[in-house]
Amino acid sequence: MTEKMQVAGFKAGAVKAGIRGKDRLDVALIYSMVPAVAAGVFTRSEVKAAPVLLDMEYLRDGRARAIIVNSGIANACTGQPGMELARGTSRLVGRQLGINEEQVLVASTGVIGQQLELSIFENCMERLAASLREDGFADVAKAMMTTDTVPKTALRRVEINGKTVTMLGLAKGAGMIMPNMATMLGFIVTDAAVADAALRDMLLHSTRLSFNAITIDGDTSTNDTVLLLANGEAGNAPITSAGSEEGRIFQGCLDELCLDLALQIVKDGEGATKLITIHVKGARSEQEADQGARTVANSSLVKTAFFGEDANWGRIIAALGRSGISFDSERVDIFFDDVLMVKDGLGQDMEQEKKATLVLKQKAFSVIIDLKSGPADGKVYTCDLSIDYIKINADYRS
Amino acid sequence: MTEKMQVAGFKAGAVKAGIRGKDRLDVALIYSMVPAVAAGVFTRSEVKAAPVLLDMEYLRDGRARAIIVNSGIANACTGQPGMELARGTSRLVGRQLGINEEQVLVASTGVIGQQLELSIFENCMERLAASLREDGFADVAKAMMTTDTVPKTALRRVEINGKTVTMLGLAKGAGMIMPNMATMLGFIVTDAAVADAALRDMLLHSTRLSFNAITIDGDTSTNDTVLLLANGEAGNAPITSAGSEEGRIFQGCLDELCLDLALQIVKDGEGATKLITIHVKGARSEQEADQGARTVANSSLVKTAFFGEDANWGRIIAALGRSGISFDSERVDIFFDDVLMVKDGLGQDMEQEKKATLVLKQKAFSVIIDLKSGPADGKVYTCDLSIDYIKINADYRS
């Protein structure tokens, strides 16, 4: 039984605006019918797209009621005209919905360096508002796609203070995915009542363990954005801190939803055939665990070995060696799922290698690297590097 | 007219020792018939192969007379048995040639994590010594190859104090090539007379601008080694400092030879179809210029765009944005050779893009990125990322 993809007090819809040809949903809108608190996490790239800069400004007061998103053009590296276009877009939506333009967040994904025309949004605005429906989120997920092959959605329900709270998430992203997001967009709406500071804290926490713990190709985009709107329609007593009992329940649910969406992105990684968890244990610090895991997860040699289903652990050690973290290579253990392949820095026998190769033939597996140098651990999720990745990215604009 | 590939006082040779099947040269020897000074530059990976650790130890006195190299097995991640094997190999060579074993440097390249058998070297040692010839260097270059498709050699002659000095270089490397070398081996022999401290300084300088300024896939190997032997047979008054007039002449010649070899490696990069120079200008520091250029050069998205001959400058700006360096994206200019594609952060018209696309169709071109934020510049040399790269690396061990 599929649960209904809707959340009290929210509507959503999408239209074909002609940015990506005639027959593709490419502009979408999410709308809270009542005031909502909002939080965002954005790319840490030095080069931030216009919509990112605008949302950072609009979110200073922790309030938002709408998100307009387009695919096809990223509105990045577009200078002053790009900022004016983003502002103009939120103004159009605000006018159409009868809300303050600063309550309208904007997100874009697609090619960098091209200008969007405001007329595109003017021409579709009435149709877009008319498309809003309580069950319109599936269309939004479709309209956000670029090289994604499937729309990405997730739904969670949880009891908070005797009230059922619903959380609905949408995401897109398939390439240019690394540390601090990528052309990765994630939108989450919930009917929970949450204070804005707590919402921000909890979104940051969940993002660190999910959207910011995935990497497809090590590239971070100019447009990465995760937005969370909470409108309080569930009627729970507002959650005022992440540390409260209610906060912890909400946090657990949000962590789960974000990881669900993030893993959907990795599975749909450009050309990906496998989902791989790189789990570094026994590091001196969380920062080093993350850095080690990320370097392994981004190594082209490691990723092509995974594509070839080759338990080439030497490439894993080589990647760790250049990662800049401290460890003793003669203490390292490496497991593929539960198969011990390297013990104290030395490869195990052919028997073990055969077992490891079977692990690598699966669609999803874990590489557990125990540095035995400290107490910290960290996980990064990635995919393999395949021939299709090259085909997709050599041809993307043509 | 091809110049003779030989240097006064040196001999070289190679044999088929059976590490890589029966019909392949896989063990080689370089020998100075007279005492020589020597310097080395090694991988900065935290995980250093046994031969690297041994050479670092043996080079403390700045003297060496022989280099034995094998391909097929890297003798990396092999623990104590690997160290003993490396020591045993230099002992065998020392005994055969009648020189101290600490005068014999060792280098290995190939698969990580497998043990080499000393019997391989015992069995071929007499044949190896018998193979030594003044014109044997071409065979050494062949014996060093792994996924290389062509042997890599370079020869330079220069006048120093009225004497003709010869410099001969051999290199191998095609994958796992990044910053601080990779399974990249470079051996240079010269008949110049140079003091050991000056030799070390000059090798470091040349390496920084050549072997350490290339990247194929961002991976650094456990075995990277560049060795330089100078035996003084040219009869010049010894060069005692890099800053002297003779030092500058030698340095210029060494710089040129190392860059020649390094670019041969990039051109032969696994699956490479193009040689690309990433030149970052106007950075705040040399360190930032290098970091920016290296991040662009290693971006899978940038490299696949080059493979696709797509002037996708947005990916270049995105890579710079995540590189961790400081700059104002609205001031950046980007040229493909002499074609201005981005001015002050904004893409130029279709006319320019057509011209840029023509530049990208060449076998070799430069991307010049002017950050206009400071006085420093830096160059990194790389290749594109092709379908063949994946094929080569998914199948390497199978």
Image (tube, coloured by chain):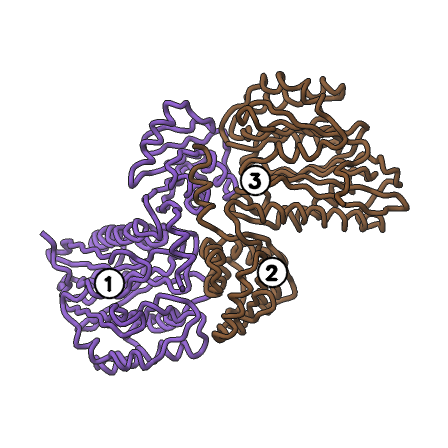
Chain colours: A brown, B purple
Tell me where residue B15 sits by quadrant.
Answer: bottom left
Tell me where residue A379 sits by quadrant.
Answer: bottom right
Residue furthest front in the image:
A1
Give the residue displayed 40% in from the left and 53% down from the top. B391
Left or right of B167 in this view: A177:
right
Judging depth in this view, the residue of A376 and A105 nearest the camera is: A105
Is there one chain holding both mark 3 and mark 2? yes
The residues bearing labels 3 and 1 have C-alpha atoms spaced at a distance of: 45 Å
Q: Which residue is mark 3?
A: A148
Q: Which residue is mark 1?
A: B142
Height in image: B314 above or below B203?
Answer: above
Judging depth in this view, the residue of B44 and B1 nearest the camera is: B1
Q: Is residue B244 visible?
A: no
Secondary structure category for the residue under label 1: helix
Tell me where residue A145 sits by quadrant.
Answer: top right
Q: Is residue A186 visible?
A: yes
The residues bearing labels 1 and 2 have C-alpha atoms spaced at a distance of: 40 Å
The residues bearing labels 3 and 2 have C-alpha atoms spaced at a distance of: 26 Å
The amino acid marked with disc number 1 is Lys
Give the residue displayed 28% in from the left and 60% down from the top. B198
Q: Give percent across and percent down for residue A7.
A: 79, 36
Left or right of B189 in this view: B226:
right
Q: Which residue is mark 2?
A: A279
Give the residue displayed 47% in from the left and 50% down from the top. A386
Judging depth in this view, the residue of B285 and B129 nearest the camera is: B129
Q: Chain of mark 1?
A: B
The amino acid marked with disc number 2 is His
Residue furthest left in the image:
B1
**Disc 1 residue crowd, few under 14, some 14–19, many 20+, Cα 10 Å:** many
Q: Chain of mark 3?
A: A
